[in-house]
Image (tube, helix red, strand yellow):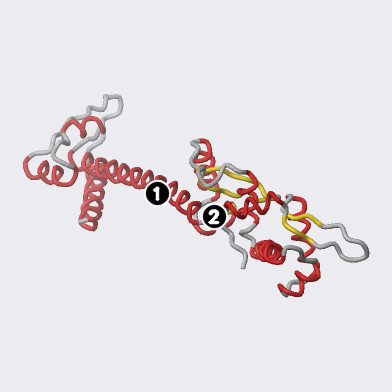
Amino acid sequence: MRRAIVVLSMILTLTGLFAVLTLPGPVRGEPLIIQDMSFSGTSHATAGQLFGPHLDIGTMSAALGTAGGPVAMSSLSALTIGTVAVNRRNDRTLRLRDRVVVEIAANPGIHLRELLRNIGCAMGALQYHLKNLEHDGVIVSVRNGNAKHFFLSDFSDNDDVLRLAAMLRNPTIRAIVLQCGAAGQVTQADLSRSLSIDKSLVSYYVNSLLSAGFLKAIRVFGREKPLTLTEGAASALQELGVVFS
């Protein structure tokens, strides 16, 4: 059906172009008279089948200001196809908003760049929907360094839960937090050995967790300071349903 419409539109467009080229032009100095030429019989029935029974071809012909039937039909075809394209574009916009919500629901704490990769849309379109969704109270966001993370608004009303959930999306941070929770107290050297992670990388992420208030160092004399979870971190992990083995 779609192919037939496209072929018919091309034929009518070419017919209209031929009609324009072959129709005699106005004599210089004389006003151009536009004639309202309604379609008759077969032509009107065909147009009705394509564009619906309520379309008045004669009225549309005059509105388009055409010089004859074929030109009016080709213009009408282009107008109708353009309208369908606009409607489909609006549908895609609505679907994108829904996809953003579904992706955030499936990945609480997802950051902007990851969301962009998963959805595969333009950055401007994504930011537009995120801004509107947050304004409408559908989602909330928190910052972790330079990254912005997104949650559904009913995920939690505790800022510590949101911030820690966002940080735990990093696999190295997640491993460090789980190790600290399971061991109770652990040094950076212990973390480096047990997780097979370079000491400098462990130090970088531990400092991030210390700055965020989720880890604290225990003061001991003459040895490396062990690390332990703060009460805020333990409470947030409990709300997130994290169980230590």
The residue shown at (62%, 55%) is 237
Q: Is residue 93 left or right of residue 34?
A: right
The residue that label 1 is drawn on is 95
Observer-nearest of 189 and 113: 189
Label 2 sits on what residue type? Leu
Label 1 sits on what residue type? Arg
Which disc, if any, is residue 115? 2
Q: Quadrant of the C terminus?
A: bottom right
Q: Are marks 2 and 1 in contact (CB under 8 Å)?
A: no
Observer-nearest of 94 and 171: 171
Observer-nearest of 233 and 202: 233
The total of numbered circles placed on residues is 2
Among numbered discs 2 and 1, the one appearing first in the sequence: 1
Q: Is residue 125 left or right of residue 58?
A: right
Q: Quadrant of the N terminus?
A: bottom left
Q: Is residue 148 left or right of residue 115?
A: right
Q: Secondary structure at mark 1?
A: helix
Residue 202, percent from left and from top: 76, 65
- For label 1, the crowd category at 10 Å Cα-Cα, with few meaning under 14, some 14 to 19 and many 20 or more, is few
Observer-nearest of 154 and 181: 181
